[in-house]
Image (cartoon, helix red, strand yellow):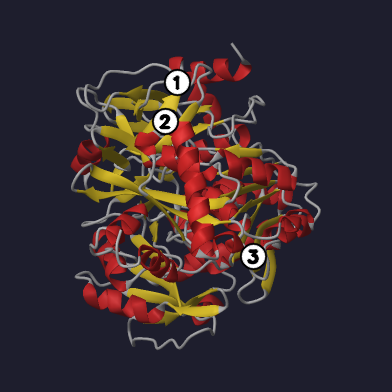
Amino acid sequence: MSRYSEFHARSLQQPEAFWREQSELIEWKSPVDRVLDASRPPFARWFPGASTNLCYNAIDRHLPSRADQPALIYVSTETGTEKTYSFAELHREVNRFAAVLLALGVLRGDRVLVYMPMIPEAVFAMLACARIGAIHSVVFGGFASHSLATRIDDARPKVIVSADAGSRSGKAVPYKMLLDQAIELASFAPEHVLMVNRGLAPMALAPGRDVDFAVERRKQWDSKVECAWLESNEPSYILYTSGTTGRPKGVQRDTGGYAVALAASMKHVFGGEAGETYFSTSDIGWVVGHSYIVYGPLLAGMATIVYEGTPIRPDGAIWWRIVEQYRVNVMFSAPTAIRVLKKQDPALLRRHDLSSLKALFLAGEPLDEPTAHWISEGIGKPVVDNYWQTETGWPIIATPRGVEALPAKFGSPGVPCYGYDVRLFDETTGAEVGSNAKGVVAIVGPLPPGCMSTIWGDDERFVSTYWHSVPGRSVYSTFDWGIRDNDGYYFILGRTDDVINVAGHRLGTREIEESISSHPGVAEVAVVGIADALKGQVAIAFAVVRNPAEVADPAARAQMEGEILKLVDSQLGAVARPSRVHFVAGLPKTRSGKLLRRTIQAICEGRDAGDLTTIEDPTALEQVRLALGGRP
């Protein structure tokens, strides 16, 4: 067995001893006596009885050794702002923010909803909640009023923290009007709304309810707030999964298990070290932002970069300029963002000094092999895929570089992370499938530390949604298809509901996308299945080409479409061949980079596209409609 194989095996065979060792990576107010209470499956309570505080571990404990070292680096290409906060300065700002929340009546266990752009105050708010034992619920900035209202009703926050506006591609995105509308729509009303005024948009304050943060901050200039020591299983935050329909699904996270899981992942998965710099290009509204912008890097004693902007403004080299300027050691982004960069001049990848960078980690969407090769060769650095979910909070599958430098396999996120007992099951029979056979990726309980403890306010929904979907099994379903090769590496094939049934043949859209992506002229692609009277469903592809001139006229488009169809024929067979390949300038996706396949499918079938509050660029939908010419 390799070193990592032994490491992983021990985590499953001796979980209490293994996680007791990992628990030493953080500080506890009362010590860890018991490691795991799994007496009520599928619920798992990690480190029951022990108490700790996320904010203390992220800031306070570093003050004796690195008070003057960078902790938070803010870069906004939207407003031209760059500011670095040391651990001591971050400590002062979080104390002030915590004192403001206390003055507004926020108590331990109260919810605070954070509806903010990527600015330092958003991070201060999250850490201040953790400091006083309040439960934060970050909602992605710019969510439409209806979606925000449903989250207000579910979390029932005592205070909402927001700002006048965010900014996207140089244009202000007003928040206050959306927030006011959401509060009107909601049946629950917060006691106060704490507003940060950036001067980007008008911001009228409602008397008696709305409070100006700048005024309250000055009142608490010298305040010092003691940390609330929480029992390990007390909730730290609620995070609503993107794309939910009906009643929102709030992922509830604990405190101690999450802190241990993140501290361990920073060491074992990402290889980060105290004093280094971590750059995640995500948003705090998503789980990557929670785990690897705010908490993970700070727990590890690293500086974390908070970036407001796009990957191509002012040009496609902006991220690499940040890497050079701030000597970034570990970077985390999404495959979709890299595919955006593929449409830029490749020379931009080599404009800046990237010698400080140890590796680029990617997650969020399956990483196709052509994109992985392109970025790895372009920046001359290891590109490390990893796979996880909002629900798990940290990677399920990866190549944990801090334990052993396992070889990478392009197209695979790697092997199961320590603590995860990952299996593949047949969706119909529930039988476990072996190597090189497709099955539903699932995890045998108990889930390791850091994973969701339940759905906020709905234990029954947690059990029925995640633990009862594989026939005859009580296992956690990821709702993703996967294949495991003979070396134990997993390949994620897409969501179990992203399956096309073509004349009785079940095809994963991701498999077809992988094939089309291997065409040298294709930068990005989405495949959806649409209803067909003869075959049940047919596949339709929407492709973004690297060079638009190659599809500038009908003859050129027909030629490339023919090349792509032949490629799919040769790799997957005629049954997988899309009925059409349409060429578009961009694909509709969320601001976190996920392709909106169901939205594309709805447009193709002439249905209502549904809730589009998370869409990054609405014009991409028009691209799809124009490509269809009014017909699928």
Residue at the extreme top of the image, as rendered: 1
Decide: few, some or many residues near mark 3? Use Cα within 10 Å; few <14, some 14-19, many ≥20.
some
The secondary element bearing badge 3 is classed as strand
Which residue is labeled 2 in the image? 448
Q: Are marks 2 and 3 in contact (CB under 8 Å)?
A: no
Q: Position of residue 163 (x, y in %)?
A: 46, 76
Q: Amino acid at mark 2?
A: Pro
Q: Are marks 2 and 1 in contact (CB under 8 Å)?
A: yes
Q: Nearer the viewer, residue 158 or 515?
A: 515
Left or right, 218 with respect to 62, comes to: left
Q: Position of residue 37 (x, y in %)?
A: 33, 27
Residue positioned 57% across, 53% down in the render: 339
How far apart in space, not on screen, are marks 2 and 3 (Cα)? Answer: 32 Å
Q: Is residue 125 visible?
A: yes
The quadrant of the image that shows the N terminus is top right
As drawn, the label of residue 15 is: 1
How far apart in space, not on screen, are marks 3 and 1 (Cα)? Answer: 39 Å
Q: Nearer the viewer, residue 302 or 511?
A: 511
Q: Nearer the viewer, residue 28 or 437?
A: 437
Which residue is labeled 3 in the image? 74
Q: Nearer the viewer, residue 76 or 622?
A: 622
Q: Work out whether mark 2 precedes mark 3 in sequence or the reverse, and give the earlier one.
A: 3
Residue positioned 55% across, 51% down in the render: 522
Choose mark 3 or mark 1, whichever is in front.
3
Q: Amino acid at mark 3?
A: Tyr
